[in-house]
Image (cartoon, rainbow, N blue to C red):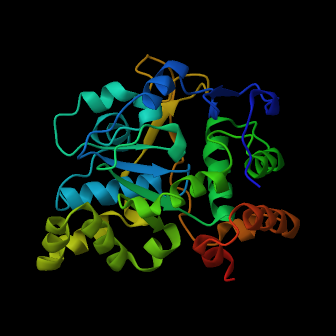
């Protein structure tokens, strides 16, 4: 059964609501409002995901494909201006872009944003137990007091930034027939790197697919530069030490390197969650996503 979060469902003080979508306090309401009212251009490319399901990975894959493996910006430059993260950088960062097509990302459910049927959207999804654990470690790096059991409960009930994971996936899955959305499995992308990168390239345009097919050296470079080990070694996310500060703050405040890339493996959730937690997560997934191919993929139904 789908869950629609309301103001009353949140006793947490570190969450605020904008038009029915919950957000962590390090975001700014006026920026979120601007995103909700923003209309994408025909040739925009949007990477839309739930947090910690392969977003950054997909950003670099898309950018590498589009630039024939030439562009590999720093983590902070990527978020702010190369492939802006809308919830942090705002619509102004997209409007300031001079290169076409514009590539940007957000974590918003499908229903929250304006639709342009010509805009290409890539949506990445990941096994829920792995996504939950990865999300926890990212949030804990921002807030050292975060309790895992509390995070688990928030993830399962949807009283968490961006709402519940399963409804988030469904919001995109329900529009697959529209023809402008590509769904990518985190697990398949990791297991079948070459084939999935070529599938993404084909979705972006035949010319990109042909370029990789005709010059395998470019494809091999993309595979190398978007490997977990390469990205973890070469990318650092610098954020303010104070969790109340804007993550992309330009103010002269104490900063730290955030442990953004942790393991990047399949199955970490099963090593972290208890059997009871795994069963509860599966039960909710089966209830909300009953009959979908993604549910069958996760649990081999």
Tell me if residue 115 can be seen.
Answer: yes
Looking at the picture, how far across and down is residue 29, in whole percent? 55, 21
Front position in the image: 236 or 295: 295
**Relative vertical location of residue 199 with respect to residue 58 in this rendering, above or below:** below
Q: What residue sits 74% from the left and 46% below the top?
A: 3
Q: What residue sits 81% from the left and 48% below the top?
A: 153
Front position in the image: 180 or 226: 180
Q: Is residue 234 left or right of residue 187?
A: left
**Relative vertical location of residue 286 with respect to residue 27 in this rendering, above or below:** below
Tell me if residue 108 can be seen.
Answer: no
Which quarter of the image is occupied by the N terminus? bottom right
Q: Is residue 204 left or right of residue 189?
A: left
Give the total of numbered labels. Answer: 0
**Relative vertical location of residue 88 with respect to residue 83 in this rendering, above or below:** above
Which quarter of the image is occupied by the C terminus? bottom right
Looking at the picture, how far across and down is residue 260, in whole percent? 52, 49
Q: What residue sits 23% from the left and 69% below the top?
A: 221
Looking at the picture, how far across and down is residue 44, in whole percent? 27, 45
Looking at the picture, how far across and down is residue 266, in whole percent? 59, 72
Where residue 296 sits, quadrant-wise, is bottom right
């Amino acid at each position: 059964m789908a869950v629609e979060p309301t103001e009353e469902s949140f006793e947490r003080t570190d969450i605020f609501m904008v038009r029915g979508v919950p957000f962590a306090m390090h975001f700014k309401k006026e920026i979120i409002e601007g995103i909700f009212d923003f209309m994408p251009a025909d040739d925009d490319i949007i990477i839309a995901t739930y947090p910690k399901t392969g977003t950054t990975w997909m950003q670099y894959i898309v950018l590498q494909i589009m630039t024939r493996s030439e562009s590999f910006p720093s983590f902070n430059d990527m978020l702010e201006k190369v492939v802006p993260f809308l919830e942090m950088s705002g619509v102004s960062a997209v409007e300031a872009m001079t290169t076409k097509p514009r590539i940007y990302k957000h974590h918003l459910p499908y229903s929250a944003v304006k639709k342009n049927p010509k805009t290409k959207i890539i949506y990445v999804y990941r096994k829920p137990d792995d996504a939950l654990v990865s999300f926890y470690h990212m949030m804990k790096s921002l807030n050292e007091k975060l309790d895992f059991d509390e995070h688990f409960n928030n993830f399962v009930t949807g009283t968490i930034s961006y709402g519940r994971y399963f409804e988030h996936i469904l919001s995109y899955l329900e529009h697959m027939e529209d023809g402008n959305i590509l769904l990518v499995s985190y697990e398949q992308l990791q297991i079948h790197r070459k084939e999935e990168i070529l599938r993404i390239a084909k979705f972006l345009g035949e010319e990109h697919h042909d370029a990789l097919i005709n010059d395998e050296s470019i494809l091999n470079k993309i595979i190398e530069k978007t490997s977990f080990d390469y990205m973890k070694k070469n990318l650092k996310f610098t954020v303010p030490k104070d969790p109340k500060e804007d993550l992309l703050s330009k103010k002269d405040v104490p900063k730290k390197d955030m442990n953004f890339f942790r393991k990047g493996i399949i199955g970490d959730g099963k090593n972290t969650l208890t059997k009871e937690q795994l069963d509860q997560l599966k039960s909710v997934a089966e209830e909300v996503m009953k009959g979908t191919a993604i549910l069958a993929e996760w649990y081999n139904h």
